[in-house]
Image (cartoon, rainbow, N blue to C red):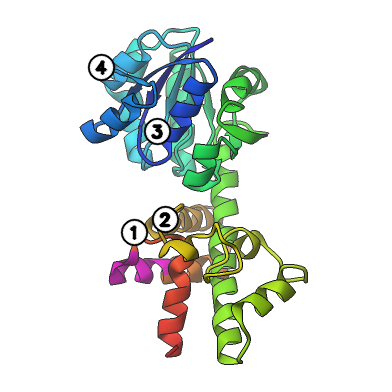
């Protein structure tokens, strides 16, 4: 059993921390939201008084925060994580943030002689709850080996992508594909509707043909064919449109820095930005099909 500090008990962090408790670990969590802390307490998570307090006796400290600036703040706070964590501990950042901030977090940990991982996740709230997340990890081999058993309590697939920042690099590339493919699937379904095809007929063909993809078979953006998809629950978010917009923005920042022309990724980022600005940021990202319909007069 490990003592684990968990900083960030939001929609993703809380169920991830709960799965660590279920695996037999002692978890001390912290979040700025008192409501989030109280909810987490119900899952057997002990609540710390601060991020530093959560880290003070931990073998492993996990952060799950909204953006790079929040991760940097927790790592650099004179009274925060690095001021309290022991030298033999491992720090794991599971947030989805920019590659530069991820590498900066590794550097801060290294100056303290502490091993670190950037380990963003894929799988959404459903995957976090079920313990079936995919972890994309950036770390040296020793740190990865130390962190793998902990990550295995929260996910079913753990991929060592390379050194510092490699996990974040893989995550933003993956989510650029996801954003583009969801728009493509949505456009195809709206076109099919206009052509007189039923949702089920469209699904039955494409799910076993060359257009098959995760956005269709697991997260179909129209009600009916995939009962578990958010389309069947008024697009209650498993992965909100505002988060997709954030990840697509990160992908475009990275593409610009590397001099890579990602025309489809850029256009997807623009479409999600407009969708969010129209008041739909809190819907699941698959609700982009509604935007396609609106622009098509459907």
Residue 216 seen in render:
yes
- Quadrant in which residue 41 is drawn: top left
Q: Nearer the viewer, residue 63 or 27?
A: 27
Residue bearing mark 3:
14
Q: Could you say whether the residue bearing mark 1 is in a helix, strand or loop? A: loop
Q: CA distance from mark 4 to mark 3?
A: 23 Å
49 relative position to 44: left or right: left
Is 94 drawn above or below residue 259 in the view shown? above
Q: CA distance from mark 2 to mark 4?
A: 35 Å
- Mark sitting on residue 79: 4
Q: Report if the CB atoms under discs 3 and 2 are less than 8 Å apart.
A: no
Residue displayed at 60% across by 78% down: 199
**Does residue 277 show up magenta in the picture?**
yes
Q: Could you say whether the residue bearing mark 4 is in a helix, strand or loop? A: loop
Q: Residues within 10 Å of mark 3 (few under 14, many from 20)?
A: many
> Which mark sits nearer the N-terminus, 1 or 4?
4
- Mark sitting on residue 237: 2
Q: Nearer the viewer, mark 4 or mark 3?
A: 3
Q: Could you say whether the residue bearing mark 2 is in a helix, strand or loop? A: loop
Residue 85 screen position, x and y as percent? 39, 12
Is 157 drawn above or below residue 112 in the view shown? below
- Mark sitting on residue 282: 1
> Which mark sits nearer the N-terminus, 3 or 1?
3
Residue displayed at 51% across by 22% down: 22
In the image, the segment drawn in magenta is 272-280
Q: Report if the CB atoms under discs 1 and 2 are less than 8 Å apart.
A: yes
Q: Nearer the viewer, mark 1 or mark 4?
A: 1
Residue 49 screen position, x and y as percent? 24, 18
Residue 262 seen in render:
no
């Amino acid at each position: 059993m490990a003592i684990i500090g968990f900083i960030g008990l939001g929609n993703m962090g809380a169920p991830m921390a709960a799965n660590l408790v279920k695996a037999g670990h002692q978890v001390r969590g912290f979040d700025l939201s008192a409501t989030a802390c109280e909810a987490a307490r119900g899952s057997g998570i002990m609540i710390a008084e601060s991020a530093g307090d959560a880290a003070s006796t931990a073998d492993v400290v996990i952060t799950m925060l909204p953006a790079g600036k929040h991760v940097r703040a927790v790592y650099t706070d004179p009274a925060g994580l690095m001021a309290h964590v022991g030298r033999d501990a491992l720090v794991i950042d599971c947030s989805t943030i920019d590659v530069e901030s991820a590498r900066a977090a590794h550097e801060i940990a290294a100056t303290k002689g502490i091993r670190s991982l950037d380990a963003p996740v894929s799988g959404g709230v459903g995957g976090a709850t079920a313990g079936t997340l995919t972890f994309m990890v950036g770390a040296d081999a020793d740190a990865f080996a130390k962190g793998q058993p902990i990550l295995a309590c929260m996910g079913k697939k753990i991929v060592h992508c390379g050194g510092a920042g490699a996990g974040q690099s893989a995550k933003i590339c993956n989510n650029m594909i996801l954003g583009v493919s969801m728009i493509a699937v949505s456009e195809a379904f709206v076109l099919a509707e206009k052509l007189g095809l039923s949702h089920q007929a469209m699904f039955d063909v494409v799910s076993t043909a060359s257009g098959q993809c995760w956005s269709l078979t697991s997260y179909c953006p129209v009600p009916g064919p995939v009962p578990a998809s958010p389309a069947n629950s008024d697009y209650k978010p498993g992965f909100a449109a505002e988060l997709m917009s954030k990840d697509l923005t990160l992908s475009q920042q990275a593409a610009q820095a590397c001099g890579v022309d990602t025309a489809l990724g850029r256009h997807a980022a623009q479409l999600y930005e407009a969708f969010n600005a129209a008041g739909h940021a809190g819907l699941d990202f698959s609700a982009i099909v509604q935007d396609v319909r609106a622009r098509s007069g459907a």
